[in-house]
Image: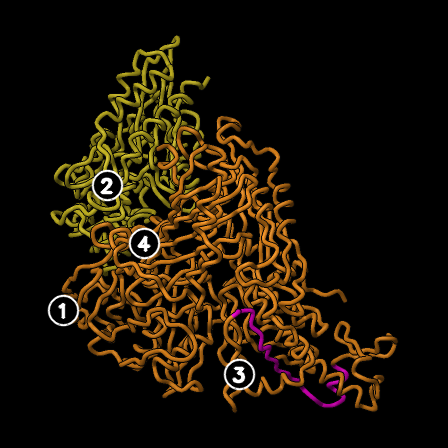
Chain colours: A orange, B yellow
């Protein structure tokens, strides 16, 4: 039987999703459910002076209004998970730190009654002077100690000034990107139900384990009393990686009113209190020789964050390693504003950062009169010069080559504004894509049943990316079973701890323990057979036995075999279980921490000591390598010279992401990233009112995302070369890299078409006719 | 959403009688009203469903014109053979609006009555003279990229959002309405009101009147017509600028020019100034540009939308060029 990994297997949950059978957080049938509706602040900063809920409380069906005056007291988060607003636990005081902040929850028998009650609650505020504008508050900027996940935000290598001042060719420009919102289809939603002191929560989250930890620490409920489900998630894009107030407010209200409570954010509320991408101002200076060789790179980012947490998007993170250059200066400074906090957004750091850097590289190429691809090749980084380590695997040159072919790069004119087709200006652009290959400690349980089917349990989740499908393939191959004989179960906090769905780490992190657990179960099965006199494999060694399509057989004699079912039935065993944990991290800082002695996870670790696949996997010293994915993005655009409208004719991406686990879901992931890039390049931007700082564009009519008509032919190719060091599977994550570089490729194509360099995203018609 | 009473009207007279109740609104496709109700921008006490009324036909009149029932769906109107053949600009304008799903629900009468998409009108946390008379206009000093540059006042700069209405303005349409006292007609140009000092008053319809039909006069030369819409994405988005153009070119001269603009004005904007330039003129790039300058001569730009003045001129020039070039 051929391995299914790498095959374009259809989504195993596809039918459930298109027939409405897949249950999302707000859809679980919970008895006696009450409905919560959030009331959010209508001022940007200040205090709540008075809350008049008399009219609301009198309405039929109203169960109660939860406010800071009557809500339960919360504890500061500790342990696992990341609460998005550490400095503003919900409903704990009268403080308002941004417009659209939760200030009360109306709970009623029906959603309509709760909505109506929410409208009738009258809140008086005392306004205080607010900080709402990045440029105007630049005086308060400071250098953060580190960025998201402890990433370095100040990197210096060599002597930038020396390298820049002596360079014969230079660019020195500022690139700006606005605030973006994730806009997952499914809003943030939570159902909470208490059964005595036991709490069950259905949540739309990218981390069931993170939610469980936070409910434990913030609500003060013991971990064994908390159960979190997130079986299907309608997209997150980073907005559900951190845990937001709704996940706390539902159990708080459920406790207070002694009823299960459902709380779903309105789309408008998601623009204030469910995360966003930070606004960036990127000053980028490049110095190069006449041969194009970079002598100096400076990437100085000014960004903003909120007063409710210190989220720092590491905008320049890729700049320290993407090209070979002796003198590099990457810095970040941050300004606090009265806005809801930013949080990770698909490719946090790299998405805006590769726009700025790759637009600057394009400008340098024109100054040098050099082909933009050639400029990248001249500065090709053979090693990670920041970490001073070899890459685990890198085939970027082939990406450039194949991408150029796919887009028809030879048709590009070096002189901007000179290529015309049917009255349109035609332009070609390209950029480099990159994202780190993250892998973290994860565990899984595998069970082989006497009826011949197998199951996997893993406390990760599928946020719509295809995790159910690719992990079914991983398990099917390890079990030597067809995919329809394997069921993968995710999104349940009672399962062994899996990775959070963020940082493109799920496939690389949970694939290996799922494989190892399945192989562990198979090993137990083989040992049953070879110790059983009734088996044709009796008295053989384990290494002599192979598995094939639900059978165990002698490697050298295909006539000596029996089915899994036969082995188990003869022994009267209904199932075989195995657990595995791979304690592996590709992050350069910190050691994986062992589980608490006596905990369920500690038992998994103990069992993993004798799991051959785990032991083999953990042997590789990941600290010897820099793990990164790379790719090349290409764009062909048509620009109307008088009206300034841009039509993208084609985008092509060639990605080097290690082994491709499933060509369909992988292509889907990259396409999704590219479409995000179209949004960033041409239309997406969140506007805050210049006078009071509240979000103006807070629905999908005012905040534009690409529609079908905006999306051209997208060609996606993969190098598909397994990474020999990341894991025995050889796959690196793929969730974010598709959005990196693409925005710059489109912007660079627009310049090639028009000769106009717009350095302020999005590139809308008004900027092109200006 | 506020609670409301729901009534299904069985005939025009019943609908009109019901409309006299305090705070009554008709509902047809509901593609705009329901959104506004969800956001508490519209809080009708009575919602009168008029979908049963016999107003869903498109009728070709003996005089060569067309009578369109108020309940005709936007899609059906856009694809009706008589509209496609005789009034190409109307079909194009309809298809440039919204999405197929919305056009399948939205009625002609509802399209006439649809309200601005000014973000400040849509957000009840902000001041808006249209929504809350006398409270002020947050858009004038706010983020006003989508707002109007023609027909504005110091009380309101909200853009009229419709595409269909721009074409109907160019086509000299007439709105037929029925009230307790019978029928009357309203010329299209008089139907929508400029904001002036009373931006909450948007149309000439009385509380108890029902739009029954839209009449389009016979206009044999209207097959030489075009609707051009410029927007921030390829589909499903309101216009930054749009132009509906009809040219009657006889012996190399423009005998009649009908020009209306969308996306830039507080009501569907028929431009007599541009038409005057072109009437009797030869169709030429230079004359088109002069007409476009005239069309926008009274425009006033704000902080974020001043670009619309030049964009509208270019949009009009392009629409005229395409229309003039038709055989």
The residue that appears at 12% across and 39% down in the rendered structure is B197
The question of residue B159 being in magenta is answered with: no
Chain at tag 2:
B
Q: Distance between the residues labelled 1 and 2?
A: 34 Å
User: What are the residue bounds of the magenta stretch?
Assistant: A565-588
Q: In this view, does A493 lie to the left or right of A611?
A: left
Query: Which comes before the other along the chain, label 1 or label 3?
Result: 1
CB contact under 8 Å: marks 1 and 2: no
Q: Which disc number belongs to residue B320?
A: none
Quarter of the rendering containing residue A698: bottom left
Same chain? Circles 4 and 3: yes
| SS for dot 4 | loop
> Where is mark 3, residue-wise?
A594
Q: x, y percentage for residue A299?
A: 43, 52
> Where is mark 1, residue-wise?
A49
Same chain? Circles 3 and 2: no
Q: How far apart are marks 1 and 3 (CA)?
A: 49 Å
Q: Is residue B297 left or right of residue A608?
A: left
| SS for dot 2 | loop
| SS for dot 1 | strand
């Amino acid at each position: 039987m051929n391995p299914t990994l790498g095959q374009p297997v259809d989504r195993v949950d596809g039918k459930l999703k298109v027939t409405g059978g897949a249950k999302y957080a707000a859809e679980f049938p919970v008895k006696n459910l009450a409905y919560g509706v959030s009331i959010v602040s209508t001022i940007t900063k200040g205090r709540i002076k008075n809350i008049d809920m008399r009219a609301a409380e009198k309405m039929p069906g109203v169960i109660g209004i939860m406010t800071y005056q009557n809500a339960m007291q919360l504890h500061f988060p500790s342990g696992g998970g990341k609460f998005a607003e550490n400095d503003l636990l919900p409903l704990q005081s009268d403080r308002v730190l941004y417009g659209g902040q939760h200030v009360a929850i109306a709970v009623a028998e029906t959603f309509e009654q709760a909505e109506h009650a929410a409208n009738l609650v009258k809140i008086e505020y005392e306004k205080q002077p607010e900080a709402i504008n990045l440029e105007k508050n630049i005086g308060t900027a400071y250098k953060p100690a580190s960025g998201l996940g402890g990433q370095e935000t100040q990197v210096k290598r060599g002597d930038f000034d020396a390298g820049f001042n002596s360079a014969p060719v230079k660019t020195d420009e500022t690139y700006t990107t606005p605030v973006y919102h994730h806009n997952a289809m499914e809003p943030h939603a939570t159902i909470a139900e208490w059964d005595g002191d036991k709490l069950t929560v259905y949540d739309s989250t990218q981390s069931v384990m993170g939610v469980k930890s936070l409910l434990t620490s913030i609500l003060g409920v013991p971990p064994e009393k908390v159960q979190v489900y997130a079986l299907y998630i309608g997209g997150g894009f980073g907005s559900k990686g951190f845990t937001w107030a709704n996940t706390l407010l539902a159990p708080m209200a459920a406790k207070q009113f002694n009823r299960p409570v459902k709380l779903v954010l309105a789309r408008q509320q998601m623009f204030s209190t469910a995360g966003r991408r930070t606004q960036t101002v990127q000053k980028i200076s490049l110095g190069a020789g006449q041969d194009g060789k970079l002598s100096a790179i400076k990437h100085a980012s000014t960004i903003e964050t909120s007063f409710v947490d210190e989220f720092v998007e590491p905008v320049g993170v890729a700049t320290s390693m993407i090209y070979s250059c002796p003198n590099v200066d990457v810095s970040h400074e941050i300004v606090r504003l009265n806005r809801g906090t930013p949080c990770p957004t698909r490719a946090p750091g790299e998405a805006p950062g590769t726009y700025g850097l790759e637009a600057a590289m394009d400008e340098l190429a024109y100054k040098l009169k050099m082909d933009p691809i050639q400029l990248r090749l001249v500065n090709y980084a053979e090693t990670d010069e920041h970490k001073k380590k070899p890459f685990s695997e890198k085939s970027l040159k082939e990406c450039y080559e194949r991408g150029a072919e796919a887009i028809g790069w030879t048709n590009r004119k070096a002189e901007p504004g000179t290529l015309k087709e049917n009255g349109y200006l035609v332009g070609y652009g390209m950029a480099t894509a990159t994202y780190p290959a993250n892998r973290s400690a994860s565990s899984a349980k595998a069970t082989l049943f006497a009826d011949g089917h197998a199951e996997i349990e893993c406390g990760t989740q599928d946020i719509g990316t295809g995790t159910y499908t690719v992990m079914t393939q991983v398990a099917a191959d390890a079990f030597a079973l067809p995919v329809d004989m394997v069921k993968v179960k995710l999104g349940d906090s009672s399962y062994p701890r899996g990775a959070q769905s963020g940082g493109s780490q799920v496939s690389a992190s949970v694939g290996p323990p799922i494989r190892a657990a399945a192989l562990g179960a198979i090993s137990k099965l083989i040992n049953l057979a070879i110790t059983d006199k009734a088996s044709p494999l009796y008295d053989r060694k384990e290494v002599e036995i192979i598995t094939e399509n639900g059978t165990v057989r002698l490697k050298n004699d295909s006539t000596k075999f029996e089915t899994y079912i036969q082995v188990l039935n003869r022994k009267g065993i209904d199932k075989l279980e195995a657990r595995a944990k791979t304690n592996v991290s590709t992050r350069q800082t910190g050691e994986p921490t062992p589980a608490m002695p006596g905990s369920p996870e500690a038992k998994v670790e103990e069992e993993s000591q004798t799991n051959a696949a785990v032991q083999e996997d953990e042997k590789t010293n990941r600290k010897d390598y820099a793990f990164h994915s790379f790719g090349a993005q290409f764009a062909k655009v048509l620009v109307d010279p008088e009206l300034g409208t841009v039509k993208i004719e084609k985008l092509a991406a060639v990605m080097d992401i290690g082994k491709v686990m499933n060509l369909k879901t992988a292509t889907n992931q990259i396409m999704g990233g590219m479409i995000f890039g179209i949004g960033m390049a041409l239309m997406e931007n969140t506007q805050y009112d210049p006078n009071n700082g509240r979000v103006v564009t807070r629905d999908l009519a005012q905040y534009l995302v690409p529609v079908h008509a905006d999306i051209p032919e997208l060609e996606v190719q993969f190098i598909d070369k397994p990474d020999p060091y990341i894991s025995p599977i050889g796959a690196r994550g793929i969730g974010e890299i598709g959005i990196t570089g693409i925005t710059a490729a489109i912007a660079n194509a627009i310049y090639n078409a028009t000769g106009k360099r717009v350095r302020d995203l999005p590139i809308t018609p008004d900027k092109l006719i200006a | 959403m506020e609670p409301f009473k729901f009534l299904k009207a069985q005939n025009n007279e019943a609908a009109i009688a019901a409309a006299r109740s305090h705070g009554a609104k008709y509902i047809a496709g509901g593609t705009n009203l329901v959104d506004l109700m969800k956001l508490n921008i519209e809080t009708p006490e009575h919602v009168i469903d008029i979908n049963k009324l016999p107003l869903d036909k498109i009728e070709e009149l003996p005089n060569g014109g067309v009578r369109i029932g108020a309940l005709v769906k936007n899609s059906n109107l856009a694809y009706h053979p008589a509209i496609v053949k005789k009034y190409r600009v109307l079909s194009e304008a309809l298809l440039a609006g919204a999405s197929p799903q919305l056009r399948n629900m939205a009625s002609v009468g509802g399209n006439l009555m649809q309200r601005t998409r000014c973000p400040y009108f849509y957000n009840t946390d902000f001041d808006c003279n249209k929504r809350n008379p006398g409270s002020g206009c947050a858009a004038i000093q706010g983020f006003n990229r989508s707002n109007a540059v023609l027909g504005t006042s110091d009380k309101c700069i909200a853009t009229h959002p419709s595409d269909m209405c721009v074409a109907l303005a160019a086509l000299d349409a007439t709105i037929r309405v029925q009230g307790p006292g019978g029928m009357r007609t309203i010329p299209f140009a008089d139907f929508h009101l400029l904001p002036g000092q009373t931006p909450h008053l948007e149309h000439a319809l009385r509380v108890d009147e029902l739009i029954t039909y839209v009449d389009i006069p016979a206009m044999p030369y209207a097959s030489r017509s075009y609707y051009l819409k410029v927007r921030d994405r390829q589909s499903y988005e309101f216009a930054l600028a749009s132009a509906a153009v009809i040219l009657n070119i006889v012996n190399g001269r423009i005998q009649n020019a009908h020009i209306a603009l969308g996306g830039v004005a507080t009501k569907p904007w028929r431009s007599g100034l541009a038409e005057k330039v072109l009437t009797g003129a030869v169709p030429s790039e230079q004359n088109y540009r002069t007409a476009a300058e005239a069309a926008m001569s009274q425009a006033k730009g704000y902080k974020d939308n001043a670009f619309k003045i030049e964009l509208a001129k270019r949009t009009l020039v392009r629409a005229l060029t395409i229309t003039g070039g038709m055989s």
